[in-house]
Amino acid sequence: MGCTRGKFFLFLYIFAGALFLLLPGEGRGQAAKTAATASQAEVTYLQGKAEVLAKGETAWKPLRVGSRLSLEDEGRTGEQSRVEIRLPDRSILRFDQKTTFKMRSLLFDAQDGSRNMRVDIPVGKTWANVRKAFGPKKTFEIASANAVAGVRDTIWRMNVETDRSTLIRVYEGTVEVYNPFVKPDYKPEETGFQAPREVRGPQEVPRPYQEVTKEQWEQIVLTQMMQVVVPAVGKPDAPTSFSPQEDQQEEWVRWNQDRDRQVRH
């Protein structure tokens, strides 16, 4: 009896495997990606009030610690409010008060470490602590209306003002900023990035830069302690270094750096 039952389950296993192999290549690939495409972000910290508008819904609902955000969900924070979310690859994003955002891509493959993350920020402030990716695909982008920032493993922030101008400051690692209307022909996962360096305390890092021409405004590379301002209309200012002392005067910066230390531990 036990032998017969074992043969029966063996037959079912072989039969199921045969059916999978008979699927078209695209079908097999889609089946393998099911877990990855179902990834969600999770709210890990909330101060004040934040809301989510789920895809296909018409009513905003309150976010709480532990709430999940799915593909195409929109979020917003109220006055005197902040929210922190952990993405499927365990990278961290934080949004300051009066910020709106949308989950454009949350693809993460836990098996090979590949990711394709994108979050849109129409207006507001975000701070990103992006984990290193080990998979063959490493795309991680945050976009405003006039600039897209592609990163790998780094700490940086983006401010999108109501006039649609965008400020990007990098604290560790490398950020590639490109024009969303003239996207350069490159793939972030195939681009060489500098390894992140340990930050040994506030220090200015002066670097000479040439003026950014219209032709160059396809892609701008920012490294540690650099910034760029992308106006709503026209070409960006030349990338410059920024003063850690001036930067530390902003409470939003100090709060995020404190949160980063807590996340590391």
Image (cartoon, helix red, strand yellow):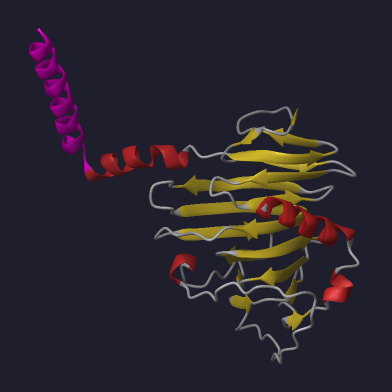
Residue 40, quarter of picture: top right
* Image vertical order of residue 105 relative to residue 145, above or below: above
* Image vertical order of residue 208 relative to residue 79, above or below: below
**Residue in front for this viewpoint, 232 or 259:** 259
Point out residue 179 in the picture as x, y percentages from the top left corner: 62, 70
Q: In this view, does 147 lie to the left or right of 247?
A: left
Q: In this view, does 245 lie to the left or right of 188?
A: right
Point out residue 54 in the picture as x, y percentages from the top left corner: 64, 32
**Residue at horizontal 59%, vertical 76%?**
219
The answer to if 7 sits in the magenta stretch is: yes
**Residue in front for this viewpoint, 107 or 264:** 264
Point out residue 240 in the picture as x, y percentages from the top left corner: 75, 82
**Residue at horizontal 21%, vertical 41%?**
24
Q: In this view, does 248 lie to the left or right of 122?
A: right
Majority secondary structure in the magenta region: helix
**Residue at horizontal 58%, vertical 65%?**
151
User: Does residue 160 appear in the picture of this structure?
Assistant: yes
| Stretch in magenta | 1-24
Residue 175, quarter of picture: bottom right
User: Does residue 162 appear in the picture of this structure?
Assistant: no
The answer to if 87 sits in the magenta stretch is: no
- Can you say which quadrant of the picture contains the N terminus? top left
* Image vertical order of residue 191 relative to residue 7, above or below: below
Q: In this view, does 78 lie to the left or right of 12?
A: right
